[in-house]
Amino acid sequence: MKIISGKVLKSILEKKGWIHHRTTGSHWIYKNIEMKEVISIPIHGNKDLPIWTLKRIMKDTNLTEEDLN
């Protein structure tokens, strides 16, 4: 699995239709109207996301490994 930063992940989600709702500290909160989901993405500069965090966000947003490329 490709490891990516929170900044890269937020860009991918925005292309998939997720909308930035608000920012709380270093966490960006996104909404998806179709899925009625709310997720939080930690953005700490260009630091890579921990693998378990990335996998959980991918599961919650229905992203695949192909989406990360």
Image (spheres, grey):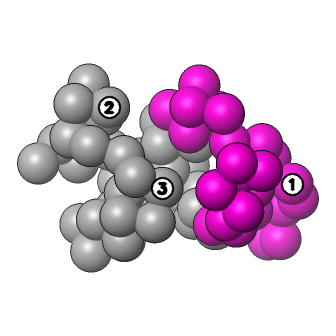
Residue 21 is tagged as 1
Q: What amino acid is labelled 3 in the image?
A: Thr
Q: CA distance from mark 3 to mark 1?
A: 15 Å
Q: Earlier in the sequence, mark 1 or mark 2?
A: 1
Q: Earlier in the sequence, mark 2 or mark 3?
A: 3
Which image quarter is the C terminus in? top left
Q: What amino acid is labelled 2 in the image?
A: Asp
Q: How many marks?
A: 3
Left or right: 46 in relation to 35: left
Label 3, on which residue? 61
Highlighted range, magenta? 12-39
Residue 64 is tagged as none
Q: Earlier in the sequence, mark 3 or mark 1?
A: 1
Q: Is residue 55 magenta?
A: no
Residue at image x 48%, y 55%? 61
Residue at image x 88%, y 59%? 22
Residue at image x 67%, y 65%? 37
Left or right: 1 in relation to 45: left
**Between 33 and 29, which is closer to the camera in this rendering?**
33
